Amino acid sequence: MLPKKIALRARQDPGALQEIRAFRSAVGAGQWVGMQGTGELTSTAVGNSDPENATLWIRNHHGYRLDVQKPKGMSSVRMDGVYGAVQHPDGKVKPMDARDAVAGVLAFPLLMEANFPAANVMLVDRGMATVDGNTLHRISMERPWPGNPVDARGNPYTTITDLYFNPQTHLLVKSANGVLGSDPSPQQLLQVITYGNYQTVNGVQIPYLYRETLNGQKLWTLQLQQVQLNQNLPQSDFHF
């Protein structure tokens, strides 16, 4: 289901905070500032089922870059706050809707930030949910956009994400967002990222396996083979 807007402002449920703290303790989030990972991405695109070399960069919690070597050239997705764009193998760059850019590619980097959750991030404990036959702890997160912009009525723009944790290990298993996709329409699509194969890198547990579905249809699987933490990545690397 699509994540739902949180009704009350300035709300952080004790149960939600406890789960977030348990996750941070389980993964050892204290030293996180970003990462670079290399591996292979397998897409469900027609006629393109072979694994392709891919590199994922994450800068803090808001900068994402995913480069995939396609048969006809490099494909690149870059996001940095409200900025987002996609470069196709032919070199053409298509801007991304700001609502999708703010959501980012992955959810776990935000949870790794040293000051998370800030007072303006709302967290609600939605209880246990059964997903793919597994019982997971669902936490809804609503956070303001970078720079705290507001609409014509003075209401802040926010992004809503549902987080699903393993209640035993407290590792993040899935995250869900409503996105507009490459052909924006009034109806949001359900984007789900699944995280797996956690491995320890310099004392921090990082997921090496990622899968994305859109309205239940699998888009791609990214299997990292090597990860380096805390790379000094310039912001310019996340823009075209």
Image (cartoon, rainbow, N blue to C red):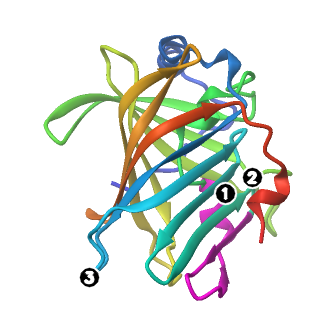
* Residue 132 is a magenta residue: no
Q: Residue at x 32, y 24 (%)?
A: 166
Residue toward you, 66 or 50: 50
Quarter-of-image position of residue 85: bottom right
Real-space Cα distance between discs 2 and 3? 38 Å
Left or right: where 62 falls relative to 89: right
Q: Amino acid at mark 3?
A: Gly
Q: Residue at x 28, y 70 (%)?
A: 44
Residue tagged 2: 145
Q: Amino acid at mark 1?
A: Val
Mark 3, secondary structure of its residue: loop
| Image position of 137 with respect to 4: above or below | above
**Image marks 1 and 2: residues in contact by CB distance under 8 Å:** yes
Residue tagged 3: 47
Q: Residue at x 66, y 63 (%)?
A: 78
Percent x, y of residue 113? 69, 28
How many other residues sit within 10 Å of disc 2, few (<14), some (14-19) or many (≥20)? some
Residue tagged 1: 102
Q: Amino acid at mark 2?
A: Trp
Q: Earlier in the sequence, mark 2 or mark 3?
A: 3
